[in-house]
Image (spheres, coloured by chain):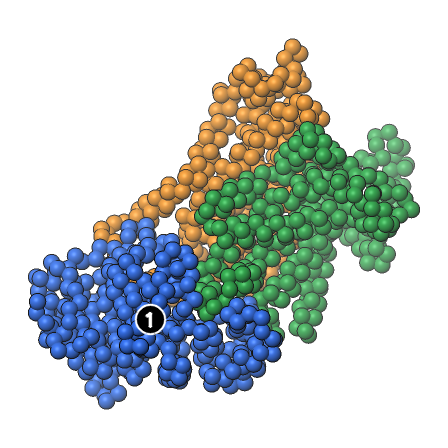
Chain colours: A blue, B orange, C green
Amino acid sequence: MEDKYVLKLNNLSVSYKVYEGLLKVIPGLDMTVMAGQRVGLIGEAGCGKTTVLKTVASILQCPPAVIKYDALEVCGKKAEGKAGVRNVRKTVSMIFQDPSTSLNPTLKISTQMSDILKSQFPGQKREDYQRRMLESLQAVAMPAPERVLDSYPVQLSGGMRQRVCIAMSLMKDSEFILADEPTTALDVTIEEQILDLLDRLVREKNKSLILVSHALGAVRKITERLFVMYAGNIVETGPTRELFASPRHPYTIGLLAATPKLTGEGIADGIEGDIPSYLHPPQGCRFADRCPRKTDLCLEKAPVLEPVEEKPGWYVACHHAEGKVRP
Amino acid sequence: MVNTVNIQTVKKVNPRAEAMKKAWYKFSRNPLSVLGLVVVVGVIFVAVFATVLAPHPEDAGLSIHMTETFQAPGLAHLAGTDEYGRDVFSRILIGLRYSLAIGLLVLAISVPFGVLMGLLAGYYKGRLIEAIIMRFTELFMSIPPLILAMVICTMFSSKYIFAAIGIAVAWWPWYTRITYNLVTSLSNELYIVYTQLSGVKMMKIIIQEMLPNIMSPILTKMSLDMGSIIITASSMSFVGLGVQPPTPSLGEMISSGIKYLPNIWWLTIMPALMVVLVVLGFNLLGDGLSDVLSVEEK
Amino acid sequence: MQNTFVMLVKRAVHFILVLMLLSFLIFSFIRLIPGDPVRLSLGVMAPEETVQRMRHELYFDRPLVVQYFHWLQGVVTKGDFGQSLYTHHAVSQDIATYLPRSLELAFYAAILILIFGVLVGTVSALFKNTWIDNVIRFLSYLGVVTPPYVIALFLLILFAYTLKWFPIGGVPSIPEEIVKTGMPGLDALLAGNWALYGKVLKSLVLPTLSISLGSIAYQARIHRSSMIENINADYIAFARVAGVSSTRLVMKHMMKPSFIPTFTIYGLQVAALLGNAFLIEVIFRYPGFSQYSLNVILNKDPYSIVAVTFVFGVIFAVVNLLIDLGVSWLDPRIRLKASE
């Protein structure tokens, strides 16, 4: 069980062709997720989180994106060739950012749900499909599931739509769920409910999860492992709790400090500046411009992920991080 | 996610010139748009210099060469000759001139009038004048343009200037509608609302802020419409409305050639091909423009 | 349901006002033009007395408003559109003779446009940027820019003159005793005369193709682009990862939302069919309503012109109403908003 991977991604690079030139969004990214593991992926807007998830789910629109990787393996299926990509797509489920655009506005909820069942488990009776749809809506704690089934998305509130989306993405037998900021488009009051629900369902069914979210508290509670992304790179990864307690990368330190604390330590400090241009990315460290620890070395040479001393599974990509194993 | 990435351009230049350069780059990248531009420029050139370029300019009128009737296309007569021995190629070139002239005339009448009406309706939104203009627009749009144009044209005179007026009467409502829609949607834009709240007169806003904004969709529509107007005009001259014989017009040449089908095919097919070429050119150009100016046809 | 009814009534009232305005406008035009339509119809040789009597009978010697309301009264009470000076029949009788023929032609064209427009557009969208798509796009571009009468000429030369598969024009005459609807094909069918129906169909093939090919091309372009817009939609990506099979995804999840713009354009195309049929009916010598309209317009036949524009106005309004009903049925967002 321990050494079974659900995701193995080696040297992913994604760029977009635009008029101004080539946007080198993701220069080279590695990521692994073990079976049954719940993983968080954090970073500010525009750093490439959605691009990574869509690549994993094999639904990134090809042109104008140029996607390259040495290996992509999801639940033992290799994404090689068209058939491989299709196999990968079968093994993952994904929950999107905005529930108001992820449901088809012209079809009833019952149609959208039953089409998944009919495609995944063909040849069953009408009543069986109906029963399963009701069950999956009850599983996401949906009030009045019969009425919801008979509704169009436009008749449901944002929170209800996201519950429907979660129910739909759990309908097929996938071991691996990708949740792309499932609460960003929702009310703060509903955020916790939805994330708790997701957490419970994933644990109950022993699925693996990548959760992208700006709700750092929830990420801390739900996930076991954390990836921190900045400008298309993973800058730090390690066990969630320890990483939250003592982040090593200056970006992670800034990012975690940027969340307002309930204890009332005043307004959080943001990080000065913006993500660098993807058109002409700096040749050295992409964070150097905003980094308090910047030296000449940072401008010349991009840092790579290196293990942190005596902390298994903890890596950081910074020339000046504390406690790094010196080569 | 990726859409929100800021794209920083390296050099700061005049934004307008930069936009033009970018538009031209996008336009020139599409070979079909360029082809459209080449065809349109070529057709206009040929039409302007028709009398110089035509090998037999005198055949535009009532000349008769009894020894040369019904000659098939060949080196002597590129598109053959008709029942009077006239050179079809020369007649096509001169007919082309009338087709383009009628197209320009229609646009010259209907675009300013239509845009003005649209601006008025948008300016007097919620008042009687808006209701009147928009009802008339609906009224004129509910009859097929060809019928309206023919009714108007026959009532006055079948001369080609009246054919143009007839088509223009059928055409202006489309420009009123598009202008009105653009003005209405712009009125809801925040910056227009703020300008208005700052005490700037609506008329001034329309002229300074809105007019430049609606120019590009209108320009695109004009290019696309040129083709439709030429088709309409040629359909009218097909039944004898518009340019009067012996002056050649593409539609009349086609219709009078039908009785010689199928053996004397060039009398119909040659002018028909010219109509297709001209319309193709204006459509390709219009599509290219709409791509570049990213206008959505509503 | 009640809202739909209110909407229908509102639309009908609005539409009647537009039609009245339209007919009044045409009347004014006719009265304004130089020349006497009655004199024109009877010819220069007719005695002045006859012309005067006819002018009186047709209300041409009364003020415009009186003439108009007399005409309107006839239309409302008796369905009488006046007298044609060109065919010398009652205009309503002429319409009953000519309109059904064109409607049958338009019916076949409308079916072809729907089926092939959607089919070709879908194939083109699914094979986006492959050679199949490029060939389709090239052909549909050509179809859009080629005027229907040029298409008609090419079809005529190729299939009628050269290959001789179809007649060069006309329509088989329908025996007087079986004429019920005035639509040649339908009458043959109702009489159970399959051989005659076959003949009628054969004569209708080229005219139908001529008026529909351009519209099919346009429809395919519209459907292609709205399909492509949907291929990139979030809800398609979501349904795909959630496990909906490709067939269902294309035939249902993509097709239904794409069909909304397609349907709107389709309605406008169908409304324009009769207007586009003018030269086609002339070229194929098909005795339909468009050809009749053309003749009355060219002969400045006042009452018929008013009636002809009236009929086109009615067709346009009815089709628009059907489009709105269809779109609100297809798009729950509109339907549910209306019922709030």
Which quadrant would residue C160 be assigned to in this image? Answer: top right
Where residue A104 sits in the image (x, y, percent)?
Answer: 51, 68
Which residue shows up at 54% across the image and 41% down it? C139
Front position in the image: A157 or A69: A69
Which residue shows up at 86% across the image and 29% down it? C45
Query: In this rendering, does residue A166 appear at all?
Result: yes
Q: Label 1: chain?
A: A
Disc 1 designates what residue? A6
Query: In this rendering, does residue B242 appear at all?
Result: no
Where residue B276 sits in the image (x, y, percent)?
Answer: 56, 35
Q: Is residue B93 left or right of residue A308?
A: right
- Note whether A66 is above or below C207 in the view shown: below
Secondary structure at badge 1 equals strand
Q: Is residue C266 left or right of residue C203?
A: left
Front position in the image: C39 or C186: C186
Q: Residues within 10 Å of mark 1 (few under 14, many from 20)?
A: many
Q: Is residue A131 left or right of residue C29?
A: left
Which amino acid, by three-letter code, is at mark 1? Val
Where residue A105 sits in the image (x, y, percent)?
Answer: 52, 68
Which residue shows up at 84% across the image and 32% down it? C43
